[in-house]
Amino acid sequence: MVVDSRYQKVAEGKSRLSALIFTQALIQILEAAILFLFTPKGEPLDRFYVSSSVICYVSLLIGELGRKRSRSTLLKLYLFGSSIASVISVAFLIKSEKLYELIKDLSKWETSAIKIFKVAAVLLGVVVQIFTIVVTSSLMHNMAPPKRAS
C-alpha cells in the first residue's frame, strides 16, 4: 500500500514532537525540584518562576492533546504557552541579581552550584523550545490540506 509522503511527514513530526514534549516535561520537573528543594524555609516561592511552571505544564497538556488529535489550533496554543513560559523563565533568570554576582566572581561557583543548575535548566529549556517551535511549525504545515492551483 502506498502512503502519501505528506502523511509520513506528519507521522514523523508527531513522533518528534512527542519526544520534545517529554523532554520539556522532564526539564520542568527538574526546575520545579530545584525550586522546591532549595528554597530556604520561611522564604516565599518566586511567583514568576511558579507562574512559568504552571503555564508550561498547562501548555504541555494542550500540546499533547493537539499532537494526539492532530489539531493545529491546540498546537498553536501550545506553542504560544510554552514560548511565554520560556520567556518568563529567562526574564526570571535575568532579574535575579545573584546571577550577576555569580558571573562577576566565578571563584564562588562551588558554593553556588544550585544557581548554576538553575541557569543550566533554563538554558536547556530554551534550546528545547527552539527545536519545539521548528518541529511544531513543520508539523502544522504538513497537517494543513494541500493548496490546489486554480
Image (tube, helix red, strand yellow):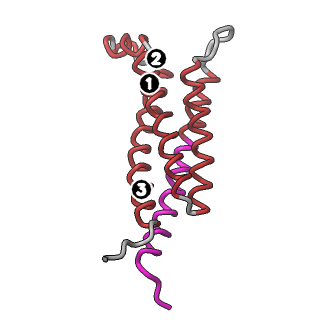
Q: Say the numbered circle drawn on residue 135.
A: 3
The answer to whether the residues at label 3 and label 1 have Cβ atoms under 8 Å apart is no
The answer to whether the residues at label 2 and label 1 have Cβ atoms under 8 Å apart is yes
Left or right: residue 112 versus residue 70 is: left
Q: Say the numbered circle drawn on residue 116.
A: 1
Residue 65 shown in magenta: no
Q: Does 38 sit above or below residue 121?
A: above
Q: Does 50 sit above or below residue 42?
A: below
The mark that comes first in sequence, 3 or 2, is 2
Front position among marks 3 and 2: 3
Residue stretch rendered in magenta on the structure: 1-26
Q: Say the numbered circle drawn on residue 112.
A: 2
Left or right: residue 79 versus residue 30 is: left
- Residue 12, percent from left and from top: 46, 68
Badge count: 3
**Mark 3: which amino acid?**
Val
Marks 3 and 2 sit apart, C-alpha to C-alpha, by 35 Å
The residue depicted at 56 percent of the width and 38 percent of the height is: 56
- Residue 53, percent from left and from top: 58, 32
The answer to whether the residues at label 3 and label 2 have Cβ atoms under 8 Å apart is no
The residue depicted at 45 percent of the width and 55 percent of the height is: 136
Task: Please rate how many residues cluster around mark 1, counting C-alpha atoms within 10 Å: few if below 14, some from 14 to 19, many from 20.
Answer: some
- Residue 65, percent from left and from top: 62, 55
Residue 8 shown in magenta: yes
